[in-house]
Structure formats: structure tokens, C-alpha cells
Image (cartoon, rainbow, N blue to C red):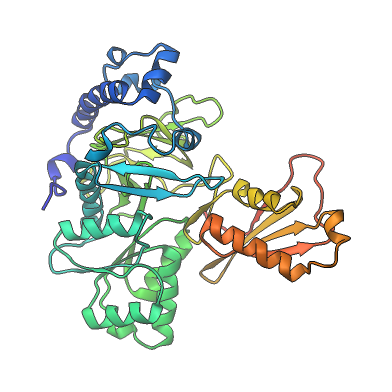
Amino acid sequence: MGNYYQPEIETMPVEQILALQSERLIKQVRYVYDHVKFYHDKMDEIGVMPDDIHGVEDLHKLPFITKDDLRDQYPYGLLAVPLTDCVRIQSTSGTTGRRVVAFYTQEDIDIWEDCCARAVMAAGGGKGDVCHVCYGYGLFTGGPGLNGGSHKVGCLTLPMSSGNTDRQIQFMTDLGSTILCCTPSYAANLGEAIQERGLKDKIKLKAGIFGAEPWTEKMRQNIEELLGIKAYDIYGLTEISGPGVSFECEEQQGMHIQEDHFIPEIINPDTGEVLPEGEIGELVFTCITKKAFPLLRYRTRDLCYLTRKKCSCGRTHIRMHKPMGRSDDMMVVKGVNVWPSQIETVLLNRGYQSNYQILVDRVGNNDTIEVQVELTPEMAANPSVTTAEREKKIVSDLKSMLGIRVDVKVVEPKTIARSEGKAVRVIDKRDLYK
């Protein structure tokens, strides 16, 4: 059943946590230096050797790694084990179509599922519960992670995947689902659909584990009221492992980071300086137990702060505040990472110039995204191709690039306002971080 339930780990004194991290960090640095040429070369370049790392106090000596590095090393450049030792890959999209691929040994899978199991238990899940997983499956980490975590705590697991709301509600009522795992926006949609059908008294849900996209406290309250549950936040990245890197307990005041597997830092995103507890900056993670795809000092670009303030749940692992924004231009729309550069690539490949604007909003519980792009003068002078035909082709290309539908509006030349400074490419009207 795994080793997810470790109160001696989750409640150990901070001094012991740091000692465990130091022990594992020293081994991990030596491991990646010896097994990943990229790290070997990067450390040699700045003159840092494995023997220079004596504990967490020396973490700042190591170089950062970014998503650009992951793309540049695609697919095998960061692999630390023979490919034959890997049992799975998961993936996320890249900014220009090149994907980030994460590899897992069986030990990596076991640890990841243990992390998700802890999250399920923190939400009150265990043997006798019915865990209804409607995160996406396949390459997306949401479904597989919570699926495995649910198994490890002995839940009856429904691997529903996303979509088909009628079927979701039928299984929810017929099989007595007690824990719901999905994106917060889909949870809200399910809640509304259940209300509309008059089935709230047929629903046995008690808790929900929601992540993969930003959501506000107001949205949490809405979901809890619609479904009659307690809504828990969960955080993770494919590059690090997937969901379960951190999770909320019943206090709902920040997510406990699983410090026996991940060391968090907060840095100044401009200077790289490590910031003290309580200051807002960019979240950085170091993996200290991963074997196939170990990352040291990975810059997430998420902005938040850390706190070791005592938690009423008894867990002593440090907590991260819900992300408060990004230090780059990435957006999360409909649970998918979207960069303006992806959209720009599609437009330029179609012959348009970089005169475009991306409009993002939330109508009810659903994200909307529209791209407005100007015709070039040459296109405007060629009436043989209709505006509708142009829009249809861009919609198709964007769907292939992003995996979601984007509305497209082709406008006349000089229509989109010019800026005398930095061009305003994105207008995001969602209030995601309050």
C-alpha cells in the first residue's frame, strides 16, 4: 500500500526535516552530477562541485534550471537513468510547440502516488470512500496522479476523466462518490448542473481536491455552497512530478509542501536572490528523491510566499500561499498552460504580422479566450480569401498547438491600438489571484 501515511515525517520537528533534506540533497547533487551531463557541465561552468554542498544551507550555490532548459534538452537531455529503467512519461505543452517530457522510474511513480495519497488523506479520504477523479488522463498528470493516490489509501476509485457531465452526475449519484478530484472550474460547472437537475440531496460528496488552474477564495466558497463540501487546493507541476507537491489541510490556509521530497525556495525573480520566509517572490523547487528526471532549483515562475507558522492540523511541513501571479507571461486557461508566444508562432506561420491581442475572461465558471489579429495590407487587398476562412484556419492551428479551442477575430489593418511602450498583448479580465 505504499508509505504515504507517515506521521513521523509529516509532523517531525523542523530541525529533523532540515536534516533529512540535507542528507538527501547531498546524495542527489552527487547523483545528478554523475548521471546528467547537462548538470555536470553547468556546475563545472560556475565552479561548484558536489563536495561543495554540505546541506540545505548550500543550496543557493547551485545553478537554476528553467523551462527553456527543459525544452532545449528535449527529449532525453535531462534523463538520469537508462531509458529501459523508465516505466512512464508525462508531458506538458511547450511555448512553441516543443513539449516538456518528464520521465518516471517505478520508484518515482510510487513516491508521486504517495504524495497524492497524503493529499487525499488530508481531505478526509480513506478506505470506504469513493474517489471520483475527473481530471484529464493520458499525458496530463492530474488524472494519473490522483488515481494512484486514491488507490493507495484504499478508496474505490472512479477514473472518470473530464467531460460528459451527465455521465459524471449519474456515476456520482449511483455509486455514492464522496471525494471529487478535478479543476475548480469544472467542479463549479458540476455543482450548477446538479442544482439545475435538483439532485443535490442525492449527492454524497464531502470533499473536493481541486487544482491545475488558478481559483479565488470567492470561487472556493461558491463551490462549497453548490456541492455542500469542503474544497481543498492542490499544487504540482509535471516537471516536478505532478499534483501532490503540496496540498491543503483542513485549515485551508496554504498548502503543505512535502518537504521530504521537495525543497522550496522563494527568490527575487529579477536577481535570483533567496528571500526570507514571508516575502513574496518566485517559487523554486529542488527534487531530492526523483531518479529518472531530477530537477535542481527549478524556477516555477509562480509568485507566492512560504510560512512555517504553526498549523492546527499538526503538520510541520512548510506551507506555500496560493500562487498570487506569474513572473512570466504564461496564462492558465481552461486548465491549460498558454503562452502568448505560442499564439504568435501560429499567426506568424500563417503570414500575419505581430499585431494581435489576446482577450481572456471568465463567463460564469468558464474561461473564454479570443485572439484578435490584423490583416496585413496585402491580405486586405486580396478578397479571394474570406475573413471566415482565415479565422477557421487559425482556430484549427491554435487547437493543434494548445489543445483547446480559441475564438479568433480577424480585423482590418491598423485596428488594434498601438503602444508607445511595451505592446499590450494580453488583456486578462479574470480576477484570479484575490
Q: Nearer the viewer, residue 106 or 120?
A: 106
Q: Residue at position x 13%, y 62% from top?
A: 154
Residue that protrudes farthest toward the left in the picture: 1
- Name which residue lies at 23% across and 36% down: 260
In terms of depth relative to the viewer, which is nearer, 291 or 357?
Answer: 291
Q: In this view, does 216 lie above or below 326?
A: below
Q: Quadrant of residue 62?
A: top left
Question: Would you say 380 lies left or right of 269 here?
Answer: right
Q: Position of residue 80 (x, y in %)?
A: 29, 31
Q: Is residue 187 above or below residue 374?
A: below
Image quadrant of residue 377? bottom right
Question: Residue at the bottom extreme?
Answer: 198
Q: Extreme front residue here?
A: 384
The one nearer the camera, 170 or 102, is: 102
How far from the left and from the top, in percent, is residue 131? 24, 67
Q: Can you see residue 250?
A: no
> Residue at left 20%, top 49%?
114
> Which of the two residues, 162 or 377, is positioned nearer the viewer here?
377
Inspect this view and state whether residue 429 appears.
yes
- Residue 370 on image: x %, y %: 65, 62
User: How far across and how far down the image is residue 79, in percent?
Assistant: 33, 34
Q: Which residue is drawn at 63% across and 52% down?
A: 343
In the rendered view, would you say 259 is above or below 341? Answer: above
The count of marks equals 0
